[in-house]
Image (cartoon, coloured by chain):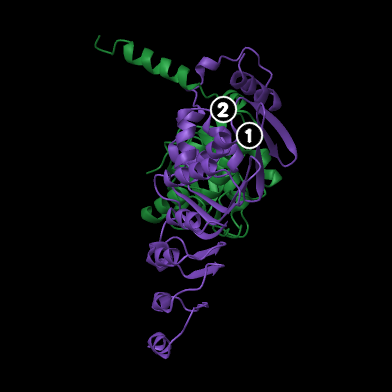
Chain colours: A purple, B green
Amino acid sequence: MDYVEFEYWFMRFVKRDFNLHYDRSRDPKQLTFSELPTDMLGEVVEFLNPKERKIARKVSKTLCAAVDRQKIDYNQIEVFIGSAEKITVAYNKDTIEYKGSPSGTIIDLRGYKKSIDNLNYVDLAFNDLAISLKPSRILVKSLRVSIEEKSDVGVINRFLHFLQSIPTGFHVKETLIETANTTLALSILSVLKPGTLETIEMFTAEGKAENHERIVEMEQFKQAKTVLLRRFGIFDPSYLQRFNGFRRFQLVLNTVEPRDIYLLRE
Amino acid sequence: MSVEPEVPIVQVEEVRENPVLYKIISSDNHVFTISEHAVKLSKTLWDLITNLGLTAENALDNPIPVENVNGKNMETIVQFCERHKYDEEEPEYTNYIREFVLPEWDRQLLSIDNEELFQLILATNYLDIQKLMDYCCRVIGDMAKDKTPEELRIIYGIPTDAEDDALERSASDSPGPSG
């Protein structure tokens, strides 16, 4: 007797119907979960958290498609790439830590540790992230990316490649990018969908003039409402007018001419 | 049009506050009485009532046939609508996961086997009762808590992709009605 059959009889007994000779063949054709219209499967998926959705994707093609079709709005995703073979990803504060070990990977999920042999921690972390970001209509309210200064270049490049491979673009409303490498920070910023992105906050460690030129030319910058650049270097006054689109800005300039002030006021 | 009920009328609740009552006939000819406030929870039924021009005076003389919903499901639906007819409208959810407390009364009402629950969902969808749809989907979603993919397959009665493909193949290999 399979579970469905068991459940049928169990519910009959609960309702105090003890007729064991009841002929089920007289019942109308059984309706199964997979036969529910797709929008209803979508409604069921709405009640599942990210972890349950990942599990549901593995059940069948139908359910996988239902999960992927579902719009997901994450309040917060945080990615920390550490220098000591460690990647931490937090989905709405639900943190998963992937740590490299001699045999493979150790996953730490809120204190519950699990060792996975023969699988690389980078593969696992980015695969889980890819699954979480798979749905076609995904919006992340806040994305924080922190990359430690001495992190493995290979891991960073894979992360960048992963971000660039998101087919519909990465829809994020606010972002905080923390990395010593400004060029890398701008590369991460470039994959975020312009227009959706309202707030950009970057904490970098170097302020090269070429990066100033690059950021003011980016659509993400032009269409943002708030931009906060820390330790981005001293801007040349020629960029002053590029900030005209913002309601308020605060900049450190190397020199300032009365002409610049006049232009700004205009 | 007047349809003679084959089975006694099921009077779900005596309505004192609102004297306007409507009669609904399920696909298997069970007759249900439902109050105006309760029937408004079903967009389909309320649109039908409005379009048919039913009023307090002629409502009971003009039963509404609902051919897509059987008596068993209609009884659950009428009970649900009567129970929730004075509920305040809930704010639209904005989080990525829907969360609300499922009242114990509703959990009891929806303690039915999966097959019945799926049938009820189809009926609810047809009658367009959003709140009941939410509750049914929540009950199905709750079954997925702390389960592995294999357990979910068993609980929901979902075949594996390989089994599904095999079924599809055998269906396409089998001769059609003409051959």
Q: Find the residue positioned furthest to the right.
A: A111
* Depth check, front residue: A225 or A101: A101
Residue under label 2 = B156
Which of the image's four quarters has the N terminus of chain A?
A: top right
Residue drawn 41% across the image and 60% down it: A194
Say whether residue A109 is left or right of residue A34: right
* Depth check, front residue: B13 or A57: A57
Say whether residue B115 is left or right of residue A6: left
The answer for how far apart the CA atoms under marks 2 and 1 are is: 9 Å
Question: What numbered label is drawn on residue B143?
Answer: 1
Residue A135 drawn above or below residue B29: below
Q: Position of residue B149 (x, y in %)?
A: 58, 27
Q: Are marks 2 and 1 in contact (CB under 8 Å)?
A: yes
Residue B29 drawn above or below residue A252: above
Mark 1 crowdedness (10 Å alpha carbons): few <14, some 14-19, many ≥20: some
* Depth check, front residue: A187 or B59: A187
Q: Position of residue A216 (x, y in %)?
A: 41, 68
Q: Position of residue A221 (x, y in %)?
A: 43, 66
* Depth check, front residue: B171 or B161: B161
Q: Dot 1 lies on which element?
A: helix
Q: Dot 2 lies on which element?
A: helix
